[in-house]
Image (cartoon, helix red, strand yellow):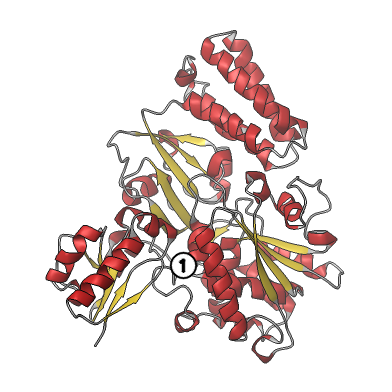
Amino acid sequence: MAYKIFIPRDSSAISLGADKVYQEILNEAKNRNIDINIVRNGSRGLFWLEPMIEVETPKGRVAYGPVTISDVASLFEIEFFLGNKHPLFLGITEDIKWLKNQERLTYARVGITDPVSILDYEKWDGFKGLKNSLKLSQENIIKEIADSGLRGRGGAAFPTGIKWKTVLDAPSEKKYIVCNADEGDSGTFSDRMIMENDPFVLIEGMIIAGLAVGADQGYIYLRSEYPHALKILNEAIDIAVDKGYLGKNILGSDFSFTLEVTRAAGAYICGEETSLLESLEGKRGMVRYKPPLPAIEGLYGKPTVVNNVISLATVPIIMDKGASFYANYGMGRSKGTLPIQLAGNLKQTGLIEKAFGISLRELLYDFGGGSATGRPIKAVQVGGPLGAFLPEEQFDTPLDYEKFTEIKAVVGHGGIVAFDDTVDMSKMARYSFEFCAIESCGKCTPCRIGSTRGMEVIDKIKEGTDQEKNVSLLRDLGDTMVNGSLCAMGGMTPFPVISALNYFPEDFGLEKTETSA
């Protein structure tokens, strides 16, 4: 009998030596004449324990980690393939506190299955959502999505059902589904993890979206820095075509849908949906004026659904379990779950899927384990480089779109980057402007010019030059960018800047007053 061992093929695990550990385990098993079957699964998201290997036992899968090639011989000595104790022994995988305290819906299969095994996918409820959808009218599919409360997980949080209904109602013989997989926010990797570790769930979600709105063509606009995802997605698409889930007359129905992966242009601005569409059409990634919205005139001027990876990957479980099942998670208008990515100065970084409502403090300390340096956490940035910096007094804010709006912050793509008390927030604020100046498409003046002027004004404040006047100027500049920019690139850049100025004025050489915050 072959002992079953799981070694992740996720790029984060590979970067930490997973491929080397895989080869070492193969060699050691051969030398010891032990029959093993290695499955290259996805990462469970516990990055501080990668490479984390698992073995199948009668009690369930048992984990060990982080494993290096120097650990392999000692693992074989204690016959780890039987689930025996070792200094790297983590116990039953599902009982690890980090995993046990999550609500994994979109990520139900991630880390469990072989990403390119369609049999594994089907075994773990794959394509049930599609099969259910093929029995429904387009209106009823969209009603399920709307009733679930699913909102855009890319950051805008726009109701997915409304977007799909708009595309369905738009008169056109040709319509498109476009997946925005140009994941560029700092500290984010949830899209990559779906594409590398459960590609079929994204494929299924896009097929259902096409069925719902009457589109027969889909594109995955993939971040150019994701070579592993490119390979896995293309492999999964070929398998789905071969098995009748993509192509003509899907599962014997009269619905046909084709899917293609396109590599992105390597520009942050192409994460903005209209700039993405320009790039997809072979043009320079420049933001379009709106209206018309992409749902009316999108790719090649046709009605187009543009959704983020997580939005589309969540559709299958909604169509499998039902709208009310998904809507029962979360709080207020923030329904369901969100993949939260912990990064920065934390002991335990990685991916968590939780229902909306958990506080930042719980995420930072219960999951993150506090700062890696052991120093106090001074600030966190939520929602990527355009997200506000939040001070310790706001760590009890629940993760909820509306609650974050109340404190002038954004949930965004769910990325959380932590900083300890050695960080200089004036440098972080200046970097926000610098990032915008580099990544701006240059189409609108507030973004193009405002970002450069912003750096200059911060420099003057730090130098002590006319501080009161320049602080006022910085706030006015932020107001102009928020209200005058064409898209969120310029419109949100002031969020991190003004929040840093409000909550950490001492880092700018200013006195902290009661009105600072």
Residue 70, located in which quarter of the rendered image?
bottom left
Residue name at image x 69 percent, y 27 percent = 450
The kind of residue on which mark 1 rests is Asn
Instruction: Find residue 259 and report its horizontal and vertical position in percent.
Output: 67, 72
Along the horizontal axis of the image, is 143 left or right of 318? Answer: right
Instruction: Find residue 346 and report its horizontal and vertical position in percent.
Output: 35, 43
Residue 490, located in which quarter of the rendered image?
top right
Residue name at image x 53 percent, y 9 percent = 464
Along the horizontal axis of the image, is 363 left or right of 431? Answer: left
Instruction: Find residue 157 and report its horizontal and vertical position in percent.
Output: 62, 54
Which residue of the protein is positioned furthest toward the bottom in this rendering? 252
Which residue of the protein is positioned furthest toward the left in this rendering? 77
Along the horizontal axis of the image, is 400 left or right of 182? Answer: left
Residue 425 appears anywhere in the view:
yes
Q: Please give the residue where the numbered disc 1 appears in the rendered image.
A: 197
Query: Please, is residue 364 above or below residue 325 in the view?
Result: above
Along the horizontal axis of the image, is 78 left or right of 332? Answer: left
Mark 1 residue crowding within 10 angstroms, few (<14) / some (14–19) / many (20+): many
Report the front residue among 407 and 315. Answer: 315
Query: Please, is residue 171 above or below residue 248 in the view?
Result: above
Instruction: Find residue 193 and report its horizontal and vertical position in percent.
Output: 48, 61
Residue name at image x 40 percent, y 35 percent = 419
Residue 397 appears anywhere in the view:
no
Helix, strand or loop under label 1? helix
Query: Please, is residue 448 above or below residue 349 in the view?
Result: above
Report the front residue among 24 and 338. Answer: 24
Q: In which quadrant will I find the N terminus?
A: bottom left
